[in-house]
Amino acid sequence: METHGNVMIIKDTTSNPAPLGLLGFGMTTVFLNLHNAGFFELNSMIIGMGIFVGGLAQVIAGVQEWKKNNTFGATAFTAYGFFWISLVTIWLLPRTAMGADLKTSETAMGWYLLMWGIFTLGMFIGTLKLSRTLQIVFGTLVILFFLLAIGDFTGNKGIKTIAGYEGIVCGLSAIYGCLAQILNEVYKRQLLPL
């Protein structure tokens, strides 16, 4: 807090929450898409990452972005954090619902992924006023959601495999954004371009 004459100026000294959100999104996206690309089965590691790193960490980052008056960051991190929590719930609920058959059909999953793709396309348009790194993250995420939706609508496993490889690129681009922001701040210069 600084005082200039009779005017008190409150200075924001809180840290940047975006690296945490990008890490949560990026790491979880890479692990799920390693599965989609066929490297290993869906397992508790992905589920744990989906709940806590992709889910909870991003929601926390979103709330911190809200406090910094960043509507884009608050919406993105909070929405995608809850995306991960909802996705894990879709996977687990049929197994825990006391005998009820709540398994989601491929058609329903196609619509779920399509709607997330449409939302992400809108967010991608917002990145055109932001950094090149965010354009890459959101652009590849749009492609990923649409590929996964097409894979579910058609039942084509080959499309899902392609989506897996594309999703790995998406996740790695978010991890790059996380590290670039951290390292640029630590070194007080642009070590990695954004």
Image: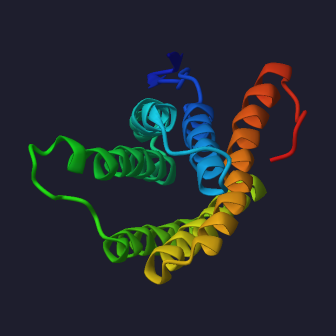
Quarter of the view holding residue 18: top right
What residue is rendered at 49% in x and 32% in y?
A: 53
**Percent position (x, y) of residue 67?**
41, 35
* Image mark count: 0
Q: Nearer the viewer, residue 60 or 115?
A: 115
Quarter of the view holding residue 129: bottom right
Q: Nearer the viewer, residue 5 or 193?
A: 193
Can residue 184 be seen at all in this image of the molecule?
A: yes
Q: Is residue 143 above or below residue 47?
A: below
Quarter of the view holding residue 6: top left
Q: Is residue 71 above or below residue 186?
A: below
What residue is rendered at 42% in x and 30% in y?
A: 52
Q: Is residue 61 above or below residue 155?
A: above
**Percent position (x, y) of residue 45?**
51, 31
* Display colour scheme: rainbow
**Percent position (x, y) of residue 86?**
32, 50
Q: Is residue 45 above or below residue 163?
A: above
Q: Nearer the viewer, residue 75 or 118?
A: 118
* Image-based side of 1 in relation to 159, left or right: left
**Percent position (x, y) of residue 79?**
39, 52
* Image-based side of 194 in relation to 108, left or right: right
Can residue 135 be seen at all in this image of the molecule?
A: no
* Image-based side of 137 in relation to 28, left or right: right
What residue is rendered at 73% in x and 60% in y?
A: 136
Q: Going by the picture, which residue comes out furthest to the front?
A: 99
